[in-house]
């Protein structure tokens, strides 16, 4: 099939190093002309490469060659910043929102909170190697941490709880799945509506076996490799 031949040709150039990480591919029109094919067939080839993590698409910008993947063990790694630092990846974190909210049912159940409990919710954008790569949601029970509502919205919540409340994860409950991007995630990450993201949910548990932090990382699947030891 023609789309497989196109996929193999582009993949060969990536693996040979002719197309390097972060390289922008020619426009779909130019690529279709180069392979003497239709844009429909070309997109099928590109979508297969995207599924295998070789390329990714940004809305209104085009297709790019993916970088190497970041290794992440969600069972032991709670602070994603330290994961990036350890593997020497350039990253930046910016606040999307920070608010005090009544805990939704799923959040309350996960953190074992009684009805009408409030949580501090932080939503942040992670830019990795210059690419808008992930949206992270963090929830901490207000009742468990006095004055946490005063936390700066740009603060690293994981590190803040460790320094100010001596809360450090002894174990994590983890759920990993693939889910479609929400409207917020699509617009923030500049990806097509409904694009699939890897969703990594971690519930941090302290040495008293109490759940004290829930965080959900929604990240482009070509950027991360889950390695559980």
Image: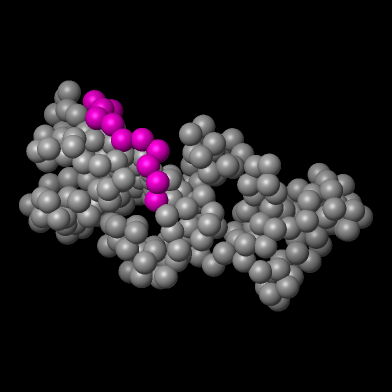
- The answer to whether 13 is drawn above or below residue 27 in the figure is below
Identity of the residue furthest to the bottom in this view: 16
- The answer to whether 149 is drawn above or below residue 208 in the figure is above
- Give the left or right position of residue 107, taking residue 219 as reference: left
Q: Depth check: 20 or 10 in front?
A: 20
Give me the residue at 62% from left, 66% from top: 21
Q: Depth check: 62 or 7 in front?
A: 62
Give me the residue at 54% from left, 36% from top: 187
The quarter of the image holding the C terminus is bottom left
- Give the left or right position of residue 143, taking residue 31 as reference: left
* Stretch in magenta: 93-104
Q: Main secondary structure of the magenta part?
A: strand
- The answer to whether 59 is drawn above or below residue 47 in the figure is above
Report the colour scheme: one colour
Residue 18 forms part of the magenta stretch: no
Residue 102 forms part of the magenta stretch: yes
Q: Measured from the top left, where is residue 228 in percent x and y? A: 35, 65
Q: Measured from the top left, where is residue 198 in percent x and y? A: 47, 49
Q: Measured from the top left, where is residue 150 in percent x and y? A: 18, 37
Give me the residue at 51% from left, 61% from top: 129
Give me the residue at 29% from left, 41% from top: 153
Q: Measured from the top left, where is residue 2 in percent x and y? A: 84, 56
Instruction: Evaluate whether residue 133 shows in this view.
Output: yes
Q: Depth check: 24 or 170 in front?
A: 24
The image quarter in which residue 111 lies: top left
The quarter of the image holding the N terminus is bottom right
Identity of the residue furthest to the right in this view: 36
């Amino acid at each position: 099939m023609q789309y497989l031949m196109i996929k193999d040709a582009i993949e060969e150039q990536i693996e040979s190093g002719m197309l390097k990480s972060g390289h922008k591919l020619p426009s779909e029109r130019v690529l279709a002309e180069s392979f003497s094919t239709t844009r429909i067939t070309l997109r099928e080839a590109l979508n297969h490469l995207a599924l295998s993590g070789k390329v990714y698409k940004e809305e209104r910008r085009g297709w790019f060659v993916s970088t190497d993947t970041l290794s992440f063990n969600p069972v032991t790694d709670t602070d994603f910043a330290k994961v990036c630092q350890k593997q020497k990846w350039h990253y930046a974190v910016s606040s999307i929102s920070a608010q005090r909210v009544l805990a939704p049912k799923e959040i309350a159940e996960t953190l074992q909170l009684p009805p009408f409990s409030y949580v501090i919710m932080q939503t942040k954008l992670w830019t990795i190697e210059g690419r808008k790569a992930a949206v992270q949601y963090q929830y901490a029970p207000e009742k468990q941490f006095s004055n946490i509502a005063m936390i700066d919205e740009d603060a690293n919540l994981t590190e803040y709880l460790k320094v100010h409340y001596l809360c450090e994860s002894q174990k994590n409950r983890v759920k990993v799945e693939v889910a479609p991007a929400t409207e917020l995630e699509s617009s923030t990450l500049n990806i097509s509506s409904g694009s699939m993201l890897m969703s990594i949910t971690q519930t941090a548990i302290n040495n008293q076996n109490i759940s004290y932090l829930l965080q959900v990382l929604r990240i482009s699947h070509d950027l991360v490799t889950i390695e559980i030891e």
